[in-house]
Amino acid sequence: MADKPYVICHMMASVDGRIDCGMTIKLRGNDEYYATLDALDAPTRVSGRVTARTEMALSGEFRSEGEALGAAGFGRAAAADGYNIVVDTKGTLLWPDQSGNPMPLLVLTSEQVGKDYLAYLDERHISWIACGDGHIDLVRACEILADEFGVERMAVVGGGHINAGFLDAGLLNEVSVLIGPGIDGRGGMVSVFDGLPMDREPIALKLESVTPYDDGAVWLRYSL
């Protein structure tokens, strides 16, 4: 593989491994989540579309009416020490203008994205990478992030399917989980890694550190 960033998956979860934000925010240990994230020294952060739609994007949806890009490409609207990367395969999320943002947005999408959506991003000073036919080629995207955007370390911060995508592509160097002292237990809730095929073998990890907190939370760090 060509150069790529050092990639850490960092999540907060209940004891049963669930990551619903509406649940984890109610657990003791939630206050440690961002402190542990900052301690990882990964100024670029990666979120999935569902997480971004809930926490970052504007309301509404972009409806492309034009031609698909049909090839790999990228647009760099700004140079920054870190980016907020959002995985949006088809290009549907709406965004505010990113001019002057010290941690600007970068949208990661497939080659099937509409050219009109990329023009929309350009108008709002939003960087983008398009690669992969139908599905995003995460390996190639990471190469572009390293070579063209200077990204050296980044944290994948959910949800469970994008975490699993980076894991399945062999891109994770480290898994960092802050476990809050509580149980979700609800059926069908997404876990830290979710959506891989049922025949997939477990992936072994090496424990690097365990940090307990007075409120009952525990921070676990593993290497792959």
Image (spheres, grey):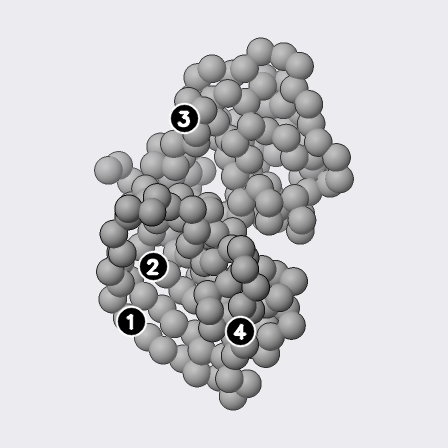
Depth check: give the residue in front, 22 or 73.
22
Q: Which residue is mark 2?
A: 174
Residue 208 at x, y = what percent? 29, 71
Q: Are discs 3 and 1 less than 8 Å apart at CB?
A: no
Depth check: give the residue in front, 163 or 140.
163
Q: Which residue is mark 1?
A: 208
Task: Label 1: state its secondary structure.
Answer: strand
Residue located at (24% from left, 38% from top): 1
Cα separation, mark 4 vs mark 3, equals: 38 Å
Q: Are discs 1 and 2 less than 8 Å apart at CB?
A: yes
Q: Earlier in the sequence, mark 4 or mark 3?
A: 3
| Amino acid type indicated by mark 2 | Glu
| Amino acid type indicated by mark 1 | Glu
Q: Are discs 3 and 2 less than 8 Å apart at CB?
A: no
Residue located at (47% from left, 73% from top): 15
Cα separation, mark 1 vs mark 4, equals: 25 Å
Quadrant of the image occupied by residue 24: bottom right
Residue located at (75% from left, 35% from top): 60
For residue 183, the mark is 4
Q: Residue furthest front?
A: 187
Q: Are discs 1 and 4 less than 8 Å apart at CB?
A: no
